[in-house]
Amino acid sequence: MQVLQLTVNGIINGSSYALLAVGFGLILQVTGRFHIAYTITYALAGYTASRLTTDYGASFWVALIVGMLVATVVGVLIEAYIYWPLGPRAGNFALLAIFTAALGLLTVGQGALGLILINSGTAQISGFNIAPEQIGQVFFINLDVYTVIISWALIVIVALVLGRTRLGRMVRAVRSNLTMSVAVGASPRMIYLVIFGIGSALGGVGGVLTSTKAAVASDSGQGAILYALTIAFLAGTFASVIRIAFVGLGLGILESLANLWVSPVWDPVIIYGLLLVYAALKPFDVVSKFRRPTLRSASASASEMAS
Amino acid sequence: MTTSDHDPRLPASRPISRRNFLSAAGFGGMALAASPLLAACSTSKPGSAKTIGSATASAASATELKKILDYIGPYDPKFSGAGTTWKLGATLPFSGNGSFFGKLWQSGIDLAVAHIKEIGGPTIQIVSSDNGSGDAQKSHNAVQQMVAAKVPGIIGTEALGGVWAPLAQYKILCLDSGAGAPIGIQGIPYYYGARSAYYSDQWVGTLEYMKQTMSDKKSIVTIDNVSTIFDPKPALRALIPNYGFQYKSSVTATTGATDYSSVIAALHQAKPDVIWASISQFDIGYFMKQYLTSGLKAPVFAFQWTRAARAIAGNGYTNQYFSTEYLDVDKPSNPWQDLYIQEYKSKNGLTPEAYTADFYMCVFMWWQLMRDVLAKGGNINRGPDLLAALQARPTFNTVFGGDATTPGLLTMDLKTHSPSALPQAVFQDTGNSLKQLATYDVGGGNFKMG
Amino acid sequence: MESTDASEAAGTATAYEGPSGDALLAVHGVTTGYGSKSVVFDVSLHVQPGEVVGIIGHNGAGKTTTLRVIFGILQAQKGKIVYLDQDITNRSPRKNVQGGIALIPSEQFVFADMSVRDNLLLGALNERSSSVINERMAEVHELLPILKERSSQLAGTFSGGQQRLLSLGTALMSGPRLLLLDEPSLGIAPALVTSLFATIKRFALERGLSVLVLEQNIGQLLRIVDRVYVMRSGSFILEETAEQMKKRDQYWDLF
């Protein structure tokens, strides 16, 4: 019975991981940016929902949508006014410069949120009447059901948009080959903004849902983002949205089932250990995943010249 | 900060006042411009210590405050330290998962510093440093900064992150109000617990209460964090049956966790009659919140009550039990406690909680040591002199316990370096107040129902 | 273009002075570069409808930069670019693609992790009519049958020459009137270069496509171009017809 309970727990947590990993992974895949300040949009969405529900009496669903929008706007602004201008200025060091900027944003954002939460340390999201649910001997809460449904609905929507629409083709073009995407008339800047918007929106929804179950704190999402990064890595930076999502789900289930044998204290060790083993056994895969595809075609041409 | 319309003991939702918002926004803007400044303003920058407190004006009149002198024990005014500026250290969690509590505890220290100054004591300067909520490297840095600042004494937290060796090496006395001196780290030279020890000091009193009121309950499951100091399980396994209960199992939780689904799954499996949650800070709030909707009905005993954790748990705290130091805001147990509660409310806009009072009390303990050193013609800036004063008179009056005429006592056990007497209580969160159910001293002595 | 001191130094051939009034593309005195640094100075050129024009020059002469400013990737610091009688100076690449200009870069010219079909569809990114896209796809398949045969193959698994053909097909999917080609022979086996250039010429002839091609392989280039600009240190130093250029005994003095 415990197996069933832990599997259900894993599906619930894995769905949250999947949502965040898709958001974070999209940003990483398409823009190549290690946007660790993703945590800020996550926490900010939760904080917005908290203020709206506790101070302004907004319904939970309104707060969820507004939280998502705030995360979206903040994500887009970060890309538009911090990362994008930094790229050309930093030249060959753009990757490092943008990572450093993201780290700075994370520190400043968490510090600022910590000051805002100075009187309570955390903030609550109200307006959702959390109630226990039980099927047989398996326990969960009604919010978990919504979390799973909303997470997978959004994942499927994003997958459909990327797979079936003109916007999706443009995104895939930019992800695949920046130079050629410009040549065929895509606008990388616009695509970067769109991707930051979509990724941040998913993070925002994840932030509100998870914070409703727990609470908003200045470091909300810090652990989740590391999981998202791990999932994006394990899935591969050219993986489809659905693949990323299933890796996230699988990791959630694995993490939960591991508690059959080890205490939850070991969860991070299991997750990051998995990443370590993967990196150790398949180092080339890990390295190549962070090379732009354009390099592959370039190296193919070069080897042909050599022959 | 405005006070809430709700019962002040409740975790009222706290709208940000304009002043606080502007302050926060200002800090945020400043941080954007210069993030190092942020570190200095909100959290201590690693690698640097800073002075956080000296005397500031108090809300109560000097005459009212001077009533405190009636409760801190006899002393010769000649040795009050008035006119002296005295530097003490404090290692507090300004970063990491306990950062909020660092700020909270600092408010207790600040109030004591102000009170001591106003009632004729010295100006105490607190040199603080960040221990990163027990992070090993930051704790090490924090203690090293105390050494560099040449403070004779430290108000400690988080058991100093295990960095005890420099205390004896540099002869710096530490009174730890954050973690106490639990089993496993007792008797360390120059390291003393200035609050009840986590959480063994509450075990006997709590079990006695359970024995008297919960005869229908049989099995206990504990929830613990991994402790680097000691493993409580063997001791509990031996102790619990003495009170008619069965120690069933222990579930380990990750420190700083917000998701307790796996812990709750383990509790479902174990089906205990009573749960002992030996987890603290925000963790206990997150657990209680999720426990509320878990379908489990076993009563939970926890060993720390803070408003911040209650705010997270919401109704999850209602009807649950707590066992630790206790402040009765409705019926203060002694006049000093009453004054402290009123003063803290006035200065911080919040009803104080026991944990913050531990830090308030600790500064008064330091003042007693200072007075005793001065009375004996010693040097207040020498750790050995302060230690000698502690050994000579290890009893301190506290804001806890006591009665209408006398405050409670903290007596330091000079062998264990942990209090052998300090008033504790079992109390219940009723949803709109805290209700005292029993009182006892650390270790379970003087147990009384009601 | 007037004969200059530089052109005189470069050789004795008479400089071309043909018409530019009805040009599909006319570049007038454009200066451009990276940031505040200029690397191309006061460049003027024109391409007539159906004409294949080449630009030759040493590495770093400014050829690619010239192509980039025409396509809108770089901003012109000075001068004017006119296409189809419209001032398109500093117009975005997207607008230029919509206007019928296609660019094939010298490297990274396919979407390697996508199928051939997806590459071709991306070429028609700015075309919303599915019937037009289908027509173009059929046309490309007819011109380059290999792209139909290997429609589902990943572009990255193609050889360099096949990738070049795919890049041409991708460019044609946008329905271009002007094709900007950056060093198409780069990285391709010599045997394939001849057939590739023949294909380019065929497109120009059969479809009335204008082509502006940058190349260092002068021998191959002169087989397909009508005129050539010679670039050195960011400026054009000579403009000749292909026939004039072919009469030279050697080209090294141009570099």
Image (cartoon, coloured by chain):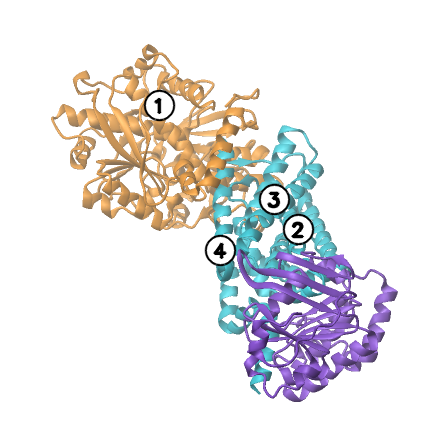
Disc 2 residue type (three-letter): Val
Q: Which residue is mark 2?
A: A138
Chain B is shown in which shade? orange
Determine if residue A199 is in view.
yes
Q: Which residue is mark 3?
A: A74
Q: Residues within 10 Å of mark 3 (few under 14, many from 20)?
A: many
Estimate the x, y position of residue A130 in percent, counting from the top left: 66, 39
Instruction: Name the disc covering residue A97, or none.
Output: 4
Q: Is residue C82 above or below residue A46?
A: below
Estimate the x, y position of residue A235 in percent, counting from the top left: 61, 65
Q: Chain of mark 4?
A: A
Q: Is residue B166 left or right of residue A274?
A: left
A252 and A81: which one is in front?
A81
Q: CA distance from mark 4 to mark 3?
A: 20 Å
Q: Which residue is mark 1?
A: B399
Secondary structure of residue under mark 3 = helix
Chain A is shown in which shade? cyan
Q: CA distance from mark 2 to mark 3?
A: 39 Å
Q: Chain of mark 2?
A: A
Secondary structure of residue under mark 1 = loop
Q: Is residue A54 above or below residue A71?
A: above
Q: CA distance from mark 3 to mark 1?
A: 48 Å
Q: Is residue C132 left or right of residue A66?
A: right
In this rendering, the label closer to the viewer, 3 or 1: 3
Disc 3 residue type (three-letter): Val
Chain C is shown in which shade? purple
Disc 4 residue type (three-letter): Ala
